[in-house]
Amino acid sequence: MRMLKWALIGLVALAFLGTFFGGSRHSGATAGTDWKLVGTAGGKGAPFGRYGYFRFVLVNPHHSRDRQMYDDAIEEVCHSDEYCTVIFWSQKHFIPATMPMSEAQADHEVASYWNNPSSGASEFLWKCAKGDDPNACFP
């Protein structure tokens, strides 16, 4: 009986580790191989009364120009029927604990996305580098 108990504990631990550190971007709702949901802000009184209206995502700086990585993260953390804003950083120490964020935190965003299901509008913007679409950039 004791061995069965330890075997079950081991399986649960492996399942947890596999979900959190899994090799697939779609392995869980909070993490991918190149990105990780690290915080939310909003709570009661937030726009539209939604908890977690803002989602804060840390991206691997080596993949910060990979549009597909952003699309994968957005698909996992912001469902099409939710009001949400997803803000991406490549340096963890600039991610705010709450909103509003500081000017320095805003200056270090690498991308952002917002979705309004009532109007069907959504927009992805990123800090542009040479060759990126200037109509889809923030300064």
Image (cartoon, rainbow, N blue to C red):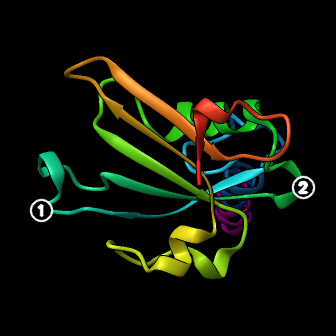
Residue 81 percent coordinates (x, y): 30, 24
Residue occupying the point 30% across, 51% down: 53
- Of pointers 2 and 1, the one earlier in the residue sequence: 1
List the residue tagged with mark 1: 44
List the residue tagged with mark 2: 62
Residue occupying the point 44% across, 80% down: 102
Residue 7 percent coordinates (x, y): 74, 58
Q: Calculate the distance from the C-alpha at mark 2 to the C-alpha at mark 1.
A: 36 Å
Query: Alpha-carbon neighbours of circle 2 within 10 Å: few (<14), some, or many (≥20)?
Result: few
> Which secondary structure class fits the magenta region best?
helix
Q: Amino acid at mark 1?
A: Lys
Which residue is more in the foreground, 64 or 132? 132
Residue 32 percent coordinates (x, y): 72, 46
Which residue is more in the foreground, 90 or 106? 106
Is residue 67 toward the left or the right of residue 95 in the image? right
- Name the outermost residue toward the top: 120
Q: Amino acid at mark 2?
A: His
